[in-house]
Image: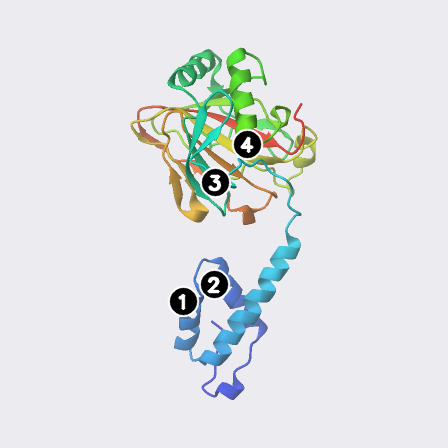
Amino acid sequence: MPKSYANTAQQSITPALRQWIIAQAEAGFTPDVVLKAMRDSGWSEEVAVEAMESTLTAHLQARKQSLPAPVAVPAPDLSQAPLQLDVGDRQVRVLSVMQNPRVVVFGNLLSDEECDALVEAARPRLSRSLTVATQTGGEEVHVDRTSDGMFFSRGESPLIQRIEERIARLLQWPVENGEGLQVLHYQPGAQYKPHYDYFDPQEPGTPTIVKRGGQRVGTLIIYLREPEKGGATIFPDVQLEVAPQRGNAVFFSYDRPHPATKTLHGGAPVLAGEKWIATKWLREREFN
């Protein structure tokens, strides 16, 4: 910490002090903790509070100005705090809602029969899961993702078409703005380390990727088969874990490609049994 002085009149808010305050805030320390550290180092309460308020206000304004502009995102109609949502052919339960990040856990999105049918249709087409290669705009095997997976073409069968139409109605987002449904299989030890689903604007391959439908703006993860232990969907920034219960789903949206959305997430390691999920990514525009 920058040096203080015993005489309050001599204490000044220097650039070094401001940098230190910003570093503490970005490291996750609360204002109370930072103020105590300043007082313990000899800073007066008055100067410490002024330094904190002025520094963090300016820092937040600068960060806000540097953020990409927000865009429209998929969103279930929760305006009346419903316990269930009518998606035409079934009632989907609203189990929990978080505002920031926008995370909604749904129950009864798929029937047991639909879950089994997806797994069996996907099983013979599985291969090592790929991730988007942001350097080139293509795909690649990545050490952080240790599942097997496959993609269904949009609307390729009556089952897929029915599920996609249900998702579109649930999230109030056009079917054509969705990527093909992906099914993933996680065996014991398999995981997907925390990551963002949007495409990083700073990566050279992103302009090529977003030509097909724009940015990703929402993700729906549907649980098809439960592991015996482990396999939760985790959101480290907000310390949230969603249990992978069969037929349920977790949805989250991100209105700009930036960590400020707090949508860092991952698939925790499966500790026993096997986990099957289906993922639907939603784009800004028609995906083709």
Location of residue 223 with respect to 7 vertically, above or below: above
State the image coordinates of residue 274 (x, y, percent, origin top left).
Answer: 34, 23
Q: Residue at x 65, y 48 (%)?
A: 68
> In the rendered structure, which amino acid carries the disc numbered 2?
Gln
Front: mark 4 or 3: 4
Q: Secondary structure at mark 2?
A: helix
Tell me if I can see residue 31 in this picture. Answer: yes
Q: Classify 10 Å Cα crowding around label 2: few (below 14), some (14-19), many (20 and above).
A: some
State the image coordinates of residue 106 (x, y, percent, origin top left).
Answer: 43, 32
Front: mark 1 or 4: 4
Tell me if I can see residue 146 in this picture. Answer: no
Q: Classify 10 Å Cα crowding around label 4: few (below 14), some (14-19), many (20 and above).
A: some
Q: Secondary structure at mark 1?
A: helix
Q: Which residue is mark 4?
A: 171
Q: Which residue is mark 2?
A: 24
Q: Secondary structure at mark 3?
A: strand
> In the rendered structure, which amino acid carries the disc numbered 1?
Val
Q: Residue at x 56, y 27 (%)?
A: 168
N-term mark: 2 or 4 = 2
